[in-house]
Amino acid sequence: MYQLLKQIATVGIKTEAPPQADEALRVVSQRLKREILGMFAGSLAIRHVDAGSCNGCELEIHMLNNPYYNIEGLGIKFVASPRHADLLLVTGPVSRNMELALKRTFDAMPAPKLVVAVGDCGCSGGIFGESYASCGRVGNVIAVDVAVPGCPPTPTALLQGILTAISSGRHGGA
Amino acid sequence: MAFDSLPLKLTELPGAVPAWQGLASAADLPDICQAVKNQGGRLAALWGTDEQDREQGYALHLALAKPEGMLWLRAALPAGELQYPDLSSIFYAAGRMQRAARDLLGIDADAADRRPWLRHAAWPDTEYPLRRNVAAATVFEKCTDDYRFVSVIGDGVHEIPVGPVHAGTIEPGHFRFSIVGEKVLRLEERLGYTHKGVDKRFRGMPFTEGAKLAGRISGDSTVAYAWAYCMALESIAAVAPPARALWLRALLLERERIANHLGDLGSLGNDGGLAFGLAQFTRLKEDVLRLNHRLFGHRYLMDRIVPGGVACDLDRSALDAIERECDALELEVRLLRDIYDDHSGLQDRFLTCGRLTPNTASKLGVIGLAGRASSQAWDLRAQAQPAPYNLLDTHMKTHKNGDVAARVILRFDEIFESLRLIRAVIERIAPGEIAAPLLSVAADKSGLGWVEGWRGESVVALESGADGRIRSCHAHDPSWQNWPALAFAVFNNIVPDFPLINKSFNLSYSGCDL
Ligand code: SF4
């Protein structure tokens, strides 16, 4: 226990003092916090759906939770059910085997709802394109508010995309 | 030679790993497989191709592995013939691969379980998308998905269906638990949700583009797959990457291993109730990713391995930065390991949880990290040793307990070993070229790539077509072998321990849904 507490004390708080201060991230984070405070009463609930990604985009979404980005500190929470989500974060080209599950997840969200398509795959189908197995971009299956390119997009780009979506006003929904 | 004793005429495939190719008739496959198994070998991959453009029928391909090398066996089915003998009674892992080959190509093993695997509702069971007469742009009419799960009947038994969309940020798949009280009697996995048609997509792709697609089969193993693909292509082109490129590849692969192990150790701490672990380990992982970005231009090292070599070089100051990072990581991870070891709450969750016995692991043919945690001594870096591992003397880490704790210990041990390997690479790397040109790639040749990624081995079997394009390419993820093991590991455990056990395996969906 002593070691554990010592480790916490020596490592300190990384969120405010990252080794290489990332100006873009700081600006995005502050705006994001303001928007979330204003519009979502301080709490934005995100549901993530992997609609067929290579798992690369998921790695960066995970990284949003690390102490450097500390997404929960901004009032953003990844939730287990679409039924209490404000925003749907979709990765991957939509595989035909996930098409129905994605639509159902979208439908299960209460309106108004926002959709952010993540990664080159989510934006355009990426290297997988459209085929017997892939519907291509997320926009081919559900209405998308913001698409974040990158393969995979960095955590900062993801935060930026989420910010753009929520500051563009609430979506009318299905 | 590793496969000498088989009654086959074998040709050696040039390249970085000891590999041979041979032809067999489908009827002889069970005997050959049994012989390989008796000699301690195993099934590494099974897939099919359509050879009708060569005025032949379909072909079934097997990759059989021994510690010393790999045999790529091709069985041409006579034109019009779709049946071949079931191999799943010899190699357990063959079952799902046979089902996948049927879904894509229509070739059928005479097996007991003939339910679809990759086919859900996107195409009817009368259509086979990997056949050459199916145009790449074809989209089939949706049909109904009437998959039959095995049901467990008994007093008080009930089912919990989970997925394909899971509660966390993870890949999609369906788990069907049959439970009594909170004890798991049976877990049935149904995957294939992220099937993107990768084999079909590879066909006709320019070789350079193929390297990018290979690097996106499973994003967390992009280095392993890109290397395996390039290894296969370099074998066909009879080009050896320059020494510096090989050292850099090993450095990238070990960095990928460290990054993934760090992430997993964090999540395992978190799932075990110690959020401190997640914060600490993801912080370390982020440091590694940031250094990746600074030195290599990509946080996950995508597209850094290219046909003929690597796409990025490091100067002295970059190598120094990596060495400093190794020193820092070594200290921090040792400290965190002590904290994990001493944390009774965490150890209580880890020990004896999700146990996969060495005996079961061996019967299922489990490989990679999960295999080594259950005494399955397979590590390509220490065995067949593709260059530059032949100069590195990798120490294979194993454990015999096969529980979550063993898989955690293995991750710690492998991080330290990777740090040692990276230091050894930095010591030996000499100035030189970082890529060799691939001048001409002959058509109708085969090449194998085989790389020990962080999860286990990635295998790529590549055939060249005309004008610098791929004739066929099949990539195989170790998760094929290991997914069935998860179902055995959760047996008799309680449902709430499933996330922890699942994470301790951390298998790929995309890698085997393809
Ligand atoms: S955008 Fe890139 S990282 Fe994301 S799913 Fe597609 S290939 Fe993978």
Image: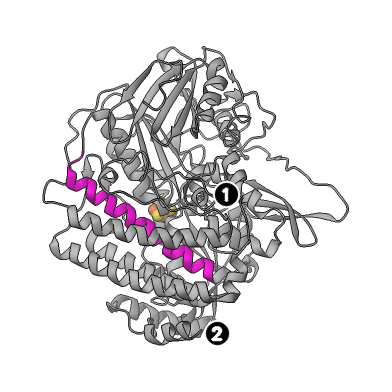
Q: Label 1 vs label 2: CA separation? A: 33 Å
Sequence-wise, which precedes: disc 1 or disc 2?
2
Look at label 1 and name its amino acid: Met
Q: Nearer the viewer, mark 1 or mark 2?
A: 1
Residue B479 at what x, y percent from top left? 51, 46
Label 2 Cα neighbours within 10 Å, binned few <14 / some 14-19 / many ≥20: few
Q: Secondary structure at mark 1?
A: loop
Q: How is the image coloured?
A: one colour
Q: Chain of mark 1?
A: A
Tell me, yes or no, whether the highlighted magenta stretch contains residue B268: yes
Residue B148 image offset from top left, x and y in percent: 73, 40
Q: What residue range appears in magenta?
A: B241-269
Can see residue B379?
yes
User: Does residue B500 appear left or right of residue B156 in this picture?
Assistant: left
Residue at mark 2:
A41
Residue B243 position, x and y percent, is 18, 44
Residue assigned mark 1: A98
Q: Is residue A141 found inside the magenta-colored segment of the image? A: no
Chain that bears disc 2: A
